[in-house]
Image (cartoon, rainbow, N blue to C red):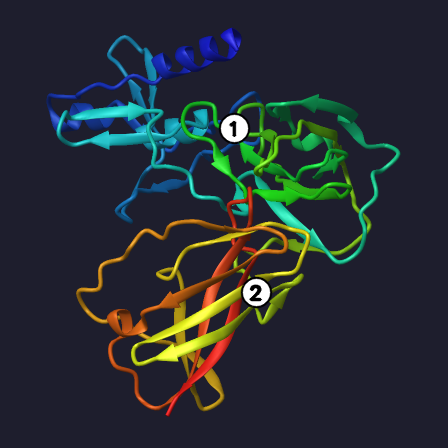
Amino acid sequence: MKKLLSYVLTLCIGFSFTLLCGNAEAISARIAYNTANYSVFHGIPQIHSGESYVAANGQEVPSSILYTDEAGGISNFLSVSQIAALLDADVKWDNQTNTVDFGTAATPVPNTENLPFTELVWSERIERSENAWSHLKEARFQSESSFSQTFLCRPDLGEYILVQVTNQGKKPVSLAVSRAKTIGQRQDFPTDAVQPGETLCRVFSVSEQGNELTSNLNVTVRPIQGADFSPMDIVVDVSQQDSVGTALEARSMKAPVLENFEGLSMEVAGQESGSVTVRIDNNSNIGFSCGGGDDYILETEENGSWIELSQVEGNDAVLPVAHHIRSGDSETMTLQYQSRYGTLEKGTYRILKPFMEIGTQQDCCYLTVKFEIK
């Protein structure tokens, strides 16, 4: 880490900033544009000679500036945003203090593509290759807290990374994967739950643009505790290989719309003017969470298609309170649709309510139920 920080500081100092003044013709004679390639650790160039750079405002500007002083000394100049990209750093401009700040960024939002990594899904079982590079091989961990480790997954070790967790404990655990940035916030992938007795395998690809700074993948496993406490007992295997032997596609962040999800269902329990009461039954062996009566979408049927209704003006969003519906539990909620959507005309409507497994961060489904206004 000291070596990396020393490298980062040295590179930052190397990119200095100056204000050039004087005769315009003299300045032009000492300046050249887009003359060099720039890479990190002798990797694939990320900035190419002869190519311009498109700034945040959409304008095309020089990707680099080469300045030769009167004594023949040469200095290379890059924009702050390009330096941040090379160093894998978050960067932000503070207009109030007139400051460029490295390492500051908004709270990360889970995504399935955090370059150079992309999470993939498959239709057939994926097996660990005999020639796979082992980052961690079938390591067992028993803990009351959590497991967390970062792996350097360079592209030359294989295009695909397999992260496999087997839950040998009595309670579900959460499996969170993220890309660790050199300077700034991590970049999260969706968090999944691993039920007792189950094995979950997640697959990620790493592009050739990855290098020692950008190719760090963090794996964190935590116990999901209910009313009774139980320590975590897991087996973790992380490997990297060139092929997986089956077709893959990028994982979608969009949850499916279903009437029943692994024993979780929703039905209309009552209906009054301006509101609908739904009953949610969890007949699965998994715990789910959802927002309260304010967390839903209302759609209307038009010509065989479902169209989301527009909310009335002045309807301020309310942060939903999480409700945990554990295995075998039921719960009723009243949805006051008139305050959100106004008075509805006669017709068929359906409610879409998002759910996620307890301990995860991504919706696993939208449960739906229909009702009519006559």
The numbered dot on residue 370 is none
Query: Mark 1, residues whose alpha carbon is within 10 Å: few (<14), some, or many (≥20)?
Result: many
Could you say which is closer to the camera, residue 49 or residue 257?
A: 257
Q: Is residue 233 above or below residue 323?
A: above
Comparing 91 with 257, the one in front is 257
- Percent x, y for residue 135? 73, 25
Q: Quadrant of residue 281?
A: bottom right
Amino acid type at image mark 1: Ala
Q: Position of residue 270 (x, y in %)?
A: 43, 76
Q: In this rendering, does residue 207 appear at all?
A: yes
Disc 2 and disc 1 in contact, CB within 8 angstroms? no
Q: Residue at x 53, y 24 (%)?
A: 213
Going by the image, does 210 lie left or right of 28?
Answer: right
Which residue is identified by label 2?
256
- Of the residues tagged 2 and 1, which is closer to the observer? 2
| 170 relative position to 100: left or right | right
Please tell me which residue is depicted at 73% across the width and 33% down the height of the picture.
169
| Residue where numbered disc 1 is placed | 180
Q: Quadrant of the C terminus?
A: bottom left
Which three-letter amino acid code belongs to the residue tagged 2? Pro
Name the residue at 34% across, 33% down.
105
Q: Residue furthest left?
A: 22
Establish if 39 lies above or below 194.
Answer: above
Percent x, y of residue 63: 36, 35
